[in-house]
Every structure is written in C-alpha cells, then in structure tokens.
Image (spheres, grey):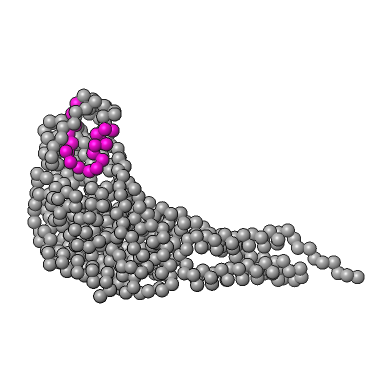
Amino acid sequence: MKKKKEKIMPFFKFLAVAMAIITIVTLCLFKFIDILPGEYFLVLCVLLILLDVIFTCLILVRKGVKRRAIGTVFSILYIIGLVLAIVYELNTIGFLKKLGFTDYKTENYSVLALKESGYEKLTDLEDLSIGSLEFTTDGLKESKEKIEKNIDVDFVTTDNITTLKDSFLEEEYEGMLIENSMLAMINESDADFQDQYKVIYDFSIDVETEDIAHEVDITKDSFNIYISGIDTYGSVSSVSRSDVNMIITVNPNTHKVLITSIPRDYYVTLAGKNAKDKLTHAGIYGIETSVATLEDLLDIKINYYVKVNFTSLIDIVNALGGVNVYSKYSFTSQDGYYYKEGYNAVDGKKALSFVRERKSFNEGDRTRVENQAAMIEALINKAISPSIITKYTSLLNALDGSFVTNLDFNDITEFIKMQIADMPNWEIENISLNGTDGYNYTYSYGGTKLYVMVPDNETVINASNKINTTLKGE
C-alpha cells in the first residue's frame, strides 16, 4: 500500500512567498538607493537569493519535521532581518530625497514698540509711523507690503542701524521694523537696548534664491564645500549671521581633506555690496553672499555649501553618541563645562559650548576658530567609523531638517559608494586665517565702529595657495 504524501500546510507556503517578496523588495530598494558598489550589490543579491532558496526548501520539505521546524525559525528570523533592512532603506531614501538645492531663504522680521508704550499689537500702530532701513535684506519691500495689508502706516526710512535705533528710542516713530539678524546685532552691540523694547508683531518672508553650485564628479574631481554655522536655533533656512565659516577642500584621489577656518569678524568686502563688513554679517544677506565673498577673498571657486545652525550641532552629536574632540588648552566655558587639554568626550550641549567659547582664551576668536575646526574633524572621524552602523537611524533623524545644502541625492550616494568600495584613510589638515584686531565702520551696522579683524594678507595668500595645492593633489 502506497504511503500517503504529507500535505504542506498553507502557513509554510505563505512563509515561502513572504520571503520571496521581501527579498525582492529589499534588493530593489538597495538598487534604488545605489550606495553599494557593483560587486558588493552582486554579492548581496547572490547571498539573499541563496538564503531564500535554502530556507524555502527547508520549510517546504515533505519529510522531516525537525528540518521544517529549523527552517521555520530561520525563515522568520530572515524576514525580521529584511524588514529591519527595509526600514533602514526607506529612512535613507526619505532623507536623501530631501537633499539638494532649496530655492528659497527665510527672513524673519519683527515690529518693535517701546516697552513703556501702550502699543501691544500691530493694529495699535494704525495711522502712526514705523521706522525701517533704506537698505537691508531682500525681503524688506515685501515685509512692508505685508504690514500695509493690515494697517495704514507711514514708513520712515534711515540709512543705518545706529540712526534707526536712536530715533526709535527718541520716539521719532512709534514702531520699528527690523529683520531679526539685524536686531541681534543691535542687542549684541547695545546690551541695554533689549530691555527697552517689546515685539508686538513678527512674521517670516520666503525669498527666492538661485542655485550657485559649481557641479563636479565628487568621486573623481577635487572640490570645495563652504560650511556655514548660523547663530540661531530653529529653522536652518533662516538667514542669520554666520558664526562658523569654513572651507573644506576634498581631493578624492589623494584622500586629503583641508579645513580652512576664517574668523567671523574678518573685515572683508561684501560681494554685491562693494563695501567693507564683517564676514559674519554676510550671512544676513543669504548664503550666496557669504560664498561669493569668500570666493573673492581667497580667489577660489566654491562648489557646494552646507549650512547648519546651533540646533543641528546638538542633535547630530547626540545622534552619533557623542564625539571625542581635541582641545589645545584646559578651560572652563562660560556655560560651566570643563575641558581638559587633549581629547574630551562631549555630548551635544557640551560640543556646542566648546565651539562657541572665546572669552576663556587670550586669543579669543582665533582659538574659537581652531576649536570649531577640531569639532568638524571629530564629527568626520566619528561619522566614518564602524560604530556609526548602530546609530544610523538616529543620525538620519537628527540630520533631517538640521541643515541645507546644494549637494544633491546623486552626489551623496556616489560618494558613499566610493567610500564603501575603497575604504580610504582620509588625511585631515587644519589651517586658519589670521589678522590684527581693530575697530571700524561696517556696511550692515553703520554709524558705529564695531570690532573687526583686519586680514593678514600673508595668511590669506597662504590659504589660497594651500587650497589650490590640495585641489591639484600637489
């Protein structure tokens, strides 16, 4: 009598189909992301298909309960593993798709009234006057139009911030319209001013911008990236003074990285304004002004930019699980954090305090610039370390919305692919520009001399030559 064949339960058939579908989805997503070199992707395909076939055979075998049980366990683990991989892939796709040029910048405006006045809201200024600058950021005209849609008001204009502030305090007009970056400059220069006003209306204007990227194949051609760290919390699209100014020169052929730091108070000619100002003030007019100003100063071409704010640094360092940053000096920051000479393990808040501190040093901003470069190096070293794998998802979440760049999806994926294929050891070098302390009038403030650093032309020329030497691989 013939033995009756054992039937295969529907559960095992479902498991086999599920494995096949998840395997295909996983491989398709890897292909779409395109961060694996061809040979790595081929090995992955062979490995996953082979595992799928083996586990399928084990669960669909008609004889051997033990083999089927083992196959079921491994099949479920296999599915769980690939589901986690799919989650990673979808997070990566979502993040990378957001990269690329953002065609607007955000300008934030406030309408002020004197603190002791009875004006509490914008409508209280109906038929009265508001002071503003004749020149300022690109959205000033639109900001006035926005106010005029709400109330009838007379705008009184002046040509510099000092006159605007003084006339406001002398009650020559009841309100004052100013972009928040400009307001921050006044508060920094006049500590008493912020106790004399209140904000009765605030709003934002999005201003269209043009892409200024000089695109190259970043896996084969050398390139410069401008890093701008703006002194705000919140939306990174907002224009603001640029407190961190670095040019990172990358040569993918020699695997050399040069970090050139420029002090925030460098006294430079603002591109498009034909007037002298602090480099930090260039950020008020948009990152394109900062880029063009540095291109003129160093006689170089900047291919791409990355802009981050203070919120970004805290989130990124925390997502990385902290970083080890080198300090040339032992010091205690104004925020109360202690740093020893040598390497220091820091979390996000301690990292931010480290890069902002200048009052603890004899060299002030010069030492701060060196510390900022040391932090960038620490971030790079942690980001390319194997430990990043376990923090991958949290890092993507931290980076999401924390920076803007005109590097696009393909640029990033091609560079990651090159890094995986070659696993090069990058040689990182730091240099910084220097100058002499002084006080002078600036385009953005006007009417009052501010502290500036007058460039030492020898350090400017040396930096320009060093950047070009790194680009050429000499």
**Residue 208 in which image quadrant:** top left
Q: Is residue 131 left or right of residue 438?
A: right
Return the x and y of residue 419 as percentages of the image width and height. 40, 69
Q: Which residue is most to the top?
A: 127
Return the x and y of residue 333 as percentages of the image width and height. 22, 59
Nearer the observer, 236 or 294: 294
The total of numbered circles placed on residues is: 0
What range is drawn magenta here?
128-146
Q: Is residue 16 left or right of residue 443?
A: right
Nearer the observer, 324 or 232: 232
Q: Is residue 168 above or below residue 42?
A: above
Nearer the observer, 419 or 308: 419
**Residue 201 in which image quadrant:** top left
Magenta-drawn stretch contains 442: no
Magenta-drawn stretch contains 137: yes
Return the x and y of residue 287 as percentages of the image width and height. 26, 52
Residue 334 seen in this snapshot: no
Nearer the observer, 310 or 95: 95
Give me the residue at 31% from left, 52% from top. Answer: 211
User: Can you say which quadrant of the picture contains the N terminus?
Assistant: bottom right
Return the x and y of residue 377 as percentages of the image width and height. 30, 67
User: Can you say which quadrant of the picture contains the C terminus?
Assistant: bottom left
Give me the residue at 24% from left, 42% from top. Answer: 138
Give me the residue at 57% from left, 59% from top. Answer: 25
Residue 364 seen in this snapshot: yes
Give me the residue at 21% from left, 59% from top. Answer: 295
Q: Is residue 90 left or right of residue 272?
A: right
